[in-house]
Image (cartoon, helix red, strand yellow):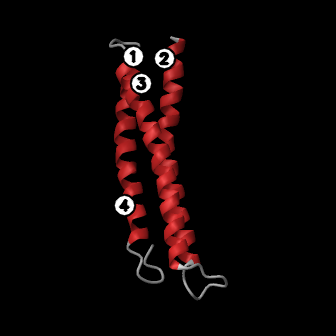
Amino acid sequence: MARAESARKRLGLAITIPPVLWAAQGLFGWFVASHACPGTSRPWSYAAARSAVVIATVLALAVTIAALSVIIRHGRSVPRGADGEPVRYLSMVGLVVGCSLTLGLIFAGLSALVIGGCGEIR
């Protein structure tokens, strides 16, 4: 029983990490975009803006993929039965959330590769 509770806690954390990182990466992208415009007090170069968004995206993807591996590992290791069903359900929810938000991170990070002018990163 204690093992199932521990697995639920780890799965809960692994499920909440991708949405938090997706939101943080999006907010960071907006911050970088606002500082990449020439009209700001200290404008960043486009290369610095691209680099910052790419680094943030790669870091977020690394942590999200690690969370997905935790979800997959726990989903496979849970025995079938009444005691393991909540953990198995959390694993399935975690896979849906994690995979969709991993794609969201990738698509949000792709904007760094196609920045052509001020504000286009948004």
Q: Residue furthest right?
A: 41
Residue at position x 52%, y 59% from top?
A: 55
CA distance for labels 4 and 3: 28 Å
Q: Which secondary structure lies at badge 3? A: helix
Residue 84 disc label: 1
The residue that disc 2 covers is: 4
Question: In percent of the image, x 50 and y 11: which residue is there?
Answer: 1
Circle 4/circle 1 CB separation < 8 Å: no
**Element class at badge 1:** loop
The three-letter amino acid code for the residue at tag 2 is: Ala
**For mark 3, what is the residue?**
74
Quick one: label 1 or label 3, which is nearer the N terminus? 3
**Alpha carbon separation for disc pair 1 and 3:** 10 Å
Q: Nearer the viewer, mark 2 or mark 4?
A: 4
Q: Position of residue 110 (x, y in %)?
A: 38, 65
Which badge, 2 or 4, is on the more N-terminal residue?
2
Pointer 4 residue: 107
Q: Depth check: 56 or 87 in front?
A: 56
Report helix, strand or loop for mark 2.
helix
**Amino acid beneath label 3:** His
